[in-house]
Amino acid sequence: MKQVVTCQEMKSCDSYTIEKMGVPSCVLMERAALKVVEELEKRFTTENIKQKILCVCGSGNNGGDGVAIARILHQHGYQSAIYLAGNPDHRTEEMQRQCQIAVNYQVPVVNNLHNEEYTTIVDAIFGVGLTREVKGEYRELIAELNEMSGWKVSVDLPSGVDGDTGIELGIAFCADLTVTFAFRKAGLCLYPGRKLAGQIVVADVGIYREDGAEPKLFSMEKSDLRELPEKEAEGNKGTFGKVLVVAGSPGMCGAAFLSASGAFATGAGMVKIITPEENRIPLQTMLPEAMISCTGDWENDFNWSDVLVIGPGIGMSVRAADKVHFFLKKAKQEGKPVVLDADGLNLLAENPEWKKYLGSHVILTPHMGEMSRLTGKSIRELKSDRAGAARALVAETGAVCVLKDACTVTAASDGRAWINLLGNAGMATAGSGDVLSGVLAGMQAMYLETPIEEKDAGFYAALGVLLHGAGGDQAALRKGMAGMKAGDVACGVAEILKEQQNFKK
């Protein structure tokens, strides 16, 4: 798990390092430039003399980084040149200093982008401070750079990407590599910024948080899966958790099957599916390991369970609403863990008074459309601040929110949020979310002997999202992103858990 920062947090870290700790900004700039040069030189494969590098520099401190990069490359024997963009009168003090140093070292400055054929183009136009749409000369410049051949590298953040949201501000530089400093920025975790950045390297340049400053945003990595517990040798199907999946509508049993499969793949000892009678034979055929309940004895089924999944494929009928209401209310009374998904969320949106049954025992798993119905906000509004939207729903309900998207954000009641960086486009297929609901329930079942504390509920939900994403990546390796299905993701989850078990041996 790594810390992620917003642009404002990054500026605060800069200020703390410079003003409180006394590290001059010119020293930080030199360190940043050296780190970029280090990453460039790792990747250069031909002789120095054949490398022609153009550093395109804006008038701010990001531009100062670019000028310093060109100068260091020049000193290392490369054919580097500087292209200065923007108004000279607007250059920061550090940018002016770097320009003078470059003059002293006789680093070439060009006024025409097409004087040479460059093998590498370094983007140092805008830093993390950009918040408005790129227009005019800057827009034309970035468009021209994107059309040029050559390997493309961004300094800290691709110019034109919003550092908080990842949104493209009209136009953005398309990089093959981005070297960012101190911490990964939120906009480098979220699409399209994550794609526009290419490969991302986080370089330590000596900028740190102020002592006592609590980070609130994190990225999840595959190594975090080592936190998952092993199965106890003396356990049995009862101690490994009983998951009740309240899912499916007449003739529609796929979502119930996939959710139950996700729970089994994650290690649940027993799974029971409450579903209409029409689904009994198909489910018993597809998943004979699961118990099927169609009797309507909800009280008995609830008492049997340790963890509940409510909603996949359940529909929007009056009967479905009665079922969701019963189990939500009962789980609130007993404090049993709940994963509320799919039509369960849509029914919640139609019955907002049910929010009184939510709390820290519930994980809400909306995709953007469901989140829009729950909150009344447009999808565009939600995507402009995914973490903020998830945190707002948590503040309203007390539940953990897993806001599903290409980069899923999990938010907890203490304000922390986690961005998942695993998974792939092949997971954008029918039923993938149903598998996730089962995986999250299976995660809850892992911790029945040592219950998850309320303060850690968000982290373990984020860990479940990470496991689901890792399973999707495993499925893509076997089937390819074009051909994989949701069931392949569940199989991938089981394979990832096998990997983790082998790692611990």
Image (cartoon, rainbow, N blue to C red):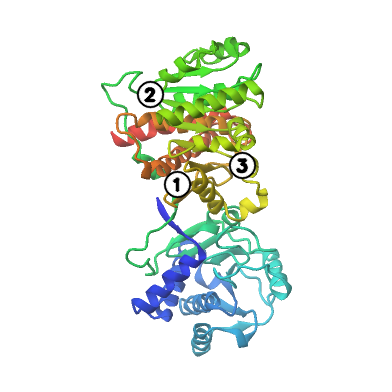
Instruction: Look at label 3 and name its amino acid.
Output: Leu
How far is mark 3 from mark 2, CA to CA? 30 Å
The label on residue 22 is none
Q: In this view, does 90 lie above or below 208?
A: below
Q: Residue at x 53, y 30 (%)?
A: 435
The label on residue 374 is 3
- Where residue 190 appears, as percent x and y from the top left, is 56, 53
Question: Helix, strand or loop at disc 1?
Answer: loop
The label on residue 241 is 2
Q: In this view, does 381 lie above or below 337?
A: below
> Which residue is label 1 attached to?
412
482 displayed left or right of 504: right
Q: In this view, does 483 lie above or below 367?
A: above
Number of residue marks: 3
Taking the image as drawn, is residue 491 in sight? no
Instruction: Look at label 2 and name its amino acid.
Output: Gly
